[in-house]
Amino acid sequence: MSSQNEQTFVMVKPDGVERGLVGEIISRLENKRLNLRKITMLEVSKELAQTHYQEHRDKPFFNDLINYITSGPVVAMVWEGDNVIEVVRKLIGDTDPKKAAPGTIRGDLALDITYNLVHGSDSEDTAKREINLFFRPTN
Ligand code: RTP
Ligand code: MG
């Protein structure tokens, strides 16, 4: 896949939905000239959360992370554009909102390392895996 048509998985986490920041987050990606390709709202099951965040299963924060992601509805999306995986990670900002640069989503809108509003895939392999996990082709 050429970098122009690269796709990534983005999820507004439960705190982003609860705080009414879905539109703000989508606007930031749209303003960057990225293209929204798929969108759905869902409640993430424990099983889906554990699979999505499987790389963190041995971390001390894993249970808190799973409880957080399953605490309310999320908005799952596929975004497309030139180098979109890296571009979205830059727009989201550092994992810890206290360290995230002003101008980034987490830097401007969040303060707590758990409640950090939004997820973006961190590599091509992860993006493919996460898109298939949340947008499983049906028949
Ligand atoms: P994400 O996967 O959600 O996009 O976040 P990320 O790549 O920036 O950070 P990652 O290391 O993958 O961590 C996943 C999520 O786990 C929570 N976390 N809590 N308490 C802690 O030390 C801690 N560290 C990470 C955050 O919700 C983080 O986004
Ligand atoms: Mg991550």
Image (cartoon, rainbow, N blue to C red):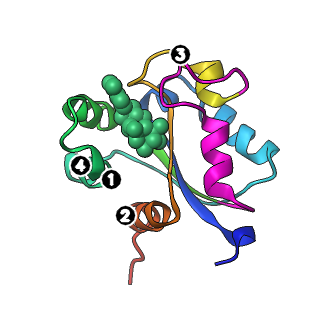
Amino acid type at image mark 1: His
Q: Position of residue 78 (x, y in %)?
A: 57, 59
| Distance between the alpha carbons at the discs numbered 4 and 2 | 12 Å
Along the line of sight, the residue nearer the viewer: 126 or 11: 126
Magenta part of the protein: which range? 80-103
Answer with left or right where residue 87 lies relative to residue 78: right
Q: Position of residue 51 (x, y in %)?
A: 26, 55
Q: Is mark 1 within 8 Å of ligand 1?
A: no
Residue underneath mark 1:
52
User: Can you tell which quarter of the image residue 62 is in?
Assistant: top left
90 inside magenta stretch:
yes
In terms of sequence position, does the residue under pointer 4 or pointer 2 come before the other?
Answer: 4
102 inside magenta stretch:
yes
| Residue 133 tag number | 2
Which residue is at 33% across, 37% downward?
A: 69
| Distance between the alpha carbons at the discs numbered 3 and 4 | 26 Å
Residue 73 seen anywhere in this rendered image of the structure:
no
Q: Position of residue 97 (x, y in %)?
A: 53, 21
Asked whether the residues under the numbered discs 1 and 2 touch, taking CB atoms below 8 Å apart as contact, a structural biologist would say yes
In terms of sequence position, does the residue under pointer 1 or pointer 3 come before the other?
Answer: 1
Q: Secondary structure at mark 3?
A: loop
